Image (tube, helix red, strand yellow):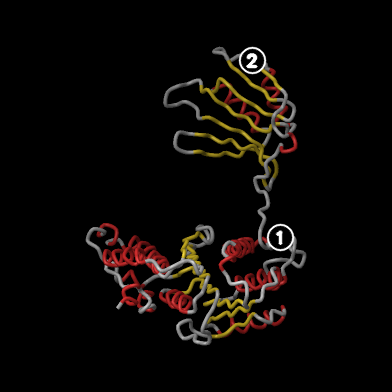
Amino acid sequence: MTEQWQQDIAGWIGGKALLQASLSQPKRKDGTAAPKTIIRPIEMKNGLFYQFEYHFANKVTHDNIAAPEAGERMIALLQDHYRQALIKTSDADVQLLFNKKGKAAILKRPPTGDAQKSVQQHNRQKQRVLAEGKAAPFLVELGIMTPEGLVHAKKQDKYKQINRFLEMVTDVLAYLPKDKELTIVDFGCGKSYLTFALYHLLAIEQQRNIRIIGLDLKADVIAFCSELSEKLGYDKLKFLVGDIADYEELHEADMVVTLHACDTATDAALAKAVNWGASVIMSVPCCQHELFKQVSNDVLAPLLSQGLLKERFSALATDAARGTLLEVLGYKVQMLEFVDPEHTPKNLLIRAVRSEEQKPSLKKWEQYKQFRQFLSISPSLEHMLEGRWPESRSE
């Protein structure tokens, strides 16, 4: 025979009245004791579910269950594993207390939960820089959005990547000069999704006085980007065919972007940015082969003797050296996850910013030299910026 508390739970879940439930006081006290469990409704793409959140000693796990199975699960847990439940509904706060025979005492009080928030939006739409529903012309032309502002299903990852990049840019805009035309260079721009996004954000939405130059070795790609820029009326967005190391048409730049420039091409771009006095640097390195051939240390032999581990370690060491050298020169550096690693392992972004108050750091230079000596490495960026290091200036 179904008891009243069981009928109540089925009714709360079926009627979408349950706001939250907390199951506690496990019946068993040994190593098989049930974890504290919190249950709450969530709205997912395919409807209403109930999330069971299990709090173990050193981890928390989740299980999303559709109604009415969620009601059956909750009733079974209370029958077999717990002596108490605190349940918030839109009508009342309810406490269930079970005696040793499994009989439940039901205590009800006026509701303290917000009845207007009975369902959490598990997939709540994130407030994005480029919001879905508002068509950005460049996204339409690049095949990411429809003219109505809807993102094509197969382009969701690219759409998220673009927004993630713009969020990272937005966080450091305060470091850019405000009393002049901003010069931004994108080395290895490729098809230029992010270059167009950057121009749209700064020139179109924020009405800033800027010019952006995109540089890439592929003539056909540059021709495509140039045609699109002209079609969109982006008169201060120019694309050029060229190599990063050989580009000498500028004497200064305020921001430098380099995404997936291969191996030491990233170092060449970072060196250009520093020599131009860039206030903001955004770099996603790629294919760090240089230090793989150099790194050596007897203490690290168990790691370096395995090719795959050595490759990954060398990549991390390369970016650690780059970041530290930028810090030596007075930049504030952050290593950020650019995109979800399930999409690409090359997802580390070096973000460096510098203000007039920030000064070169001798302490960082000493740290770098110890790091370099420990690994027996000689990174290209150090040589490309020779003459800028503290020892050189003091000679």
* Above or below 256: residue 74: above
> Alpha carbon of mark 1 to alpha carbon of mark 2: how far?
50 Å
Q: In the displayed structure, would residue 246 be above or below residue 76?
A: below
Quarter of the N terminus within the rendering: top right
Determine the secondary structure under disc 1.
loop
Q: Secondary structure at mark 2?
A: strand
Marking on residue 132: 1
Q: Earlier in the sequence, mark 1 or mark 2?
A: 2
Q: 358 and 189: which one is in front?
A: 358
Across and down, in percent, residue 268 comes to: 44, 78
User: Which label number is shown at residue 43?
Assistant: none
Side (left or right) of 322 relative to 276: left
Amino acid type at image mark 2: Ala
Residue sitting at 36 percent across and 75 percent down? 380
Q: Which residue is mark 2?
A: 105
Identify residue type, mark 1: Glu
> Which of 36 and 28 lies nearest the eye of the viewer?
36
Q: Mark 2 packing: few (<14 Cα in 10 Å), some, or many (20+)?
A: few
Residue 182 pos. (x, y %): 60, 76
Q: Residue at x 55, y 39 (%)?
A: 62
